[in-house]
Image (spheres, grey):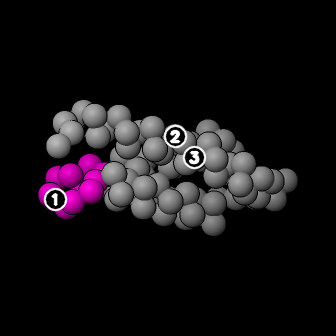
Amino acid sequence: MASFGAQLFWMIALGLTLGYFSHYIYLKYSVPIWLSLALSTAGAVLMGVLAHLLVFGLPLMYALLGSVIFLFVGNLFLSQEE
């Protein structure tokens, strides 16, 4: 089993990667790139750490799910057409 530090690194990397790609998927309907990166990283770290603390299995899967949820909600309520 990987250490918590390694899992935290991959949660942050996962959040940054998903935030970067989601900005280009939504194109002109997306939030600014810095907000997309911040939302996805916050979602990944929050859900991943919560899953690790509650001793759920596969905390990186929960990090992925949290990142997608934060990005969806952020793009739903904060996006503006340019």
- Does 36 sit left or right of 79 as displayed? left
Residue that mark 3 sits on: 19
Q: Amino acid at mark 3?
A: Gly
Q: Amino acid at mark 2?
A: Leu
Residue that mark 2 sits on: 16
Quadrant in which residue 30 is drawn = bottom right
Quadrant in which residue 33 is drawn = top right
Report crowding for label 1: few under 14, some 14 to 19, many 20 or more residues within 10 A (C-alpha). few
From mark 2 to mark 3, how far is it between C-alphas? Answer: 5 Å
Q: Give SS at disc 3.
A: helix
Is 10 covered by the magenta stretch? no
Residue 10 x, y percent position in the rendering: 37, 39
- Which callout, 1 or 3, points at the residue further toward the start of the chain? 3
Q: Amino acid at mark 1?
A: Leu
- Does 51 sit left or right of 35 as displayed? left
Is 58 covered by the magenta stretch? yes
Query: For residue 35, which numbered disc appears in the image?
Result: none
Depicted 62 relative to depicted 15: above or below: below
The one of 60 and 37 positioned closer to us in this rendering:
60
Q: Give SS at disc 2.
A: helix
Query: For residue 54, which numbered disc appears in the image?
Result: 1
- Which callout, 2 or 1, points at the residue further toward the start of the chain? 2
Report crowding for label 2: few under 14, some 14 to 19, many 20 or more residues within 10 A (C-alpha). many
Residue 76 x, y percent position in the rendering: 63, 66
Residue 25 x, y percent position in the rendering: 71, 54
From mark 2 to mark 1, how far is it between C-alphas? Answer: 24 Å
Q: Give SS at disc 1.
A: loop
Which region is colored magenta? 48-59
Residue at 68 percent of width and 48 percent of height: 23
Q: Is residue 44 visible?
A: yes
Residue at 15 percent of width and 58 percent of height: 55
**Which quadrant would the N terminus be assigned to in this image?**
top left
